[in-house]
Amino acid sequence: MTARPAPSKEVARLRLYILSILIDLAMLGIAFALANAMVLGSLSGEPGKPHGLVMFAMIAPVYALIAINGGAYGIRMIGNRRASAVKAVWSLTQAALLTLIIIYFGKIGEQLSRLTFVVGLLVGGTGLYVARILMERIALALLGEVPHFTVLLVDGVEVNAPREAHLVFAKDLGFDPTIRTAKMAEKLARGVGGAERIVVACTAERMEAWRVALTALSAKGELLVPEMSRFAPAKVSQFDDHPTLVVAGGPLLFRDRLLKRLLDVLVSSCAILLLSPVLIAAAIAVRLSGPGPILFRQARMGKDAHPFMILKFRTMHVAQTDQAAEKLTEKDDPRVTRVGAFLRKTSIDELPQLFNVLRGDMSVVGPRPHAAAAKAADSLYWEVDERYWARHCIKPGMTGLAQVRGHRGPTDSHEDLVNRLQSDLEYVTNWSIWRDLRIIVATLGVLAHDNAY
């Protein structure tokens, strides 16, 4: 059986997500305009009374925030009209209550038509259901079908064709979960595309290998275990009428990734503008320090172990740069120029990564990206601790929890890596936008560090 390639899902989800919000807001705007016309006889309303569109302007932003946080949007809501409508109407109800509180404390109740407000809500609730029908048709028109975000990955066993998933065979990908290298991890990520849920059907002997492999993905990873049908209370998820074991959580929901991306774009854009004099001065200093490029580019492992080219100001003599990062920088390293030593000491050499963030390769906050050849003592990072792959389930960051805790510099021992890994996994497990903001602020206090060389 030929595997069906998974479509590019992340872009499709973003477009549908934004379009769903805009359609809902349009429906609410129309609803309050109609309510105004029905109750007051015109769109302009009675003299001295704000019309329905003003009420819409008050309730719309509150509704949008509550609906996004309440899960009213997303690809799983497409085709699940009833569940989506229930979430949307409940969000509208909460938004109405909050708006009424604002009206009460603002002492503007006498300026509003209460009947227009009630009719607007009733018509708006109906409009939100109609919006779900419209959204389904738009999804079909744009994509040809409502996309599924589940991949069934088969490794050495026979399974029936799934009803709602992309079928992929490990042998077609050339992927072996027992081989734990950066290239193999990247091969798995490319093979499953942007899927949100990976269900693996394999033999019992290879389950442990697949458990480790799945933790490197930014997706929910599950192992298909048909034998668990005898222990119904023990199952933790289900696929195609079979219980599965969830072994990888997929740390961030889509709305969380969207919120984190908005923070990244805002922070990186502002930082580039504010720090432009520093960037220009550093570029000039690097150019005057000796022949060679101003920027140093090196392949690092990003989200899902995909490689990307990280940007830094060049701090070493050109002939002695280490593209593979087989030898980490040491204190008083003769390869580092005088200008480079200052840039490293003050962390200015990392500032070009703001463009990596703006481009989407990195996040402002996250686990620091490593080169595939980097070692702790004489061992590759993933040979030290198998949990290492779990840090690749989100984008790497310019700074992170490990950095603000002082875990920087060379990894001369296994303990150096484990200390950073513990912080990285804690960050991945307990992510919140507020924690990102706290780490950004805390980073300002550790820009200059004794281990930054």
Image: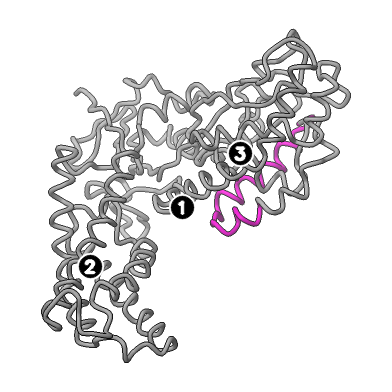
Residue 149: x and y in percent read 29, 42
Query: Disc 2 marks which residue?
Result: 28
**Dots 2, 3 in contact, CB < 8 A:** no
Q: Earlier in the sequence, mark 2 or mark 1?
A: 2
Residue 446: x and y in percent read 77, 46
From the viewer's perspective, tell me whether residue 113 is left or right of residue 212. Answer: left
Distance CA(mark 2)–CA(mark 1): 24 Å
Q: Residues within 10 Å of mark 1 (few under 14, many from 20)?
A: few
Q: Residue at x 52, y 37 (%)?
A: 358
Disc nearest the viewer among 2 and 1: 2
From the viewer's perspective, tell me whether residue 358 is left or right of residue 132. Answer: right
Q: Residue at x 73, y 11 (%)?
A: 318
Type of amino acid at the residue the image marks with label 3: Ile
431 magenta-colored:
yes
Disc nearest the viewer among 1 and 3: 3
Badge number at residue 272 = 3
What is the magenta range?
411-439
Type of amino acid at the residue the image marks with label 2: Leu
Distance CA(mark 1)–CA(mark 3): 20 Å
In the rendered image of this protein, does residue 208 appear above or below residue 253? above
**Dots 2, 1 in contact, CB < 8 A:** no
Badge number at residue 259 = 1
In the rendered image of this protein, does residue 393 appear above or below residue 435? above
In the rendered image of this protein, does residue 51 appear above or below residue 109? above
Type of amino acid at the residue the image marks with label 1: Leu
Pick the residue in front: 238 or 451.
451
The residue at the far right in this view is: 332
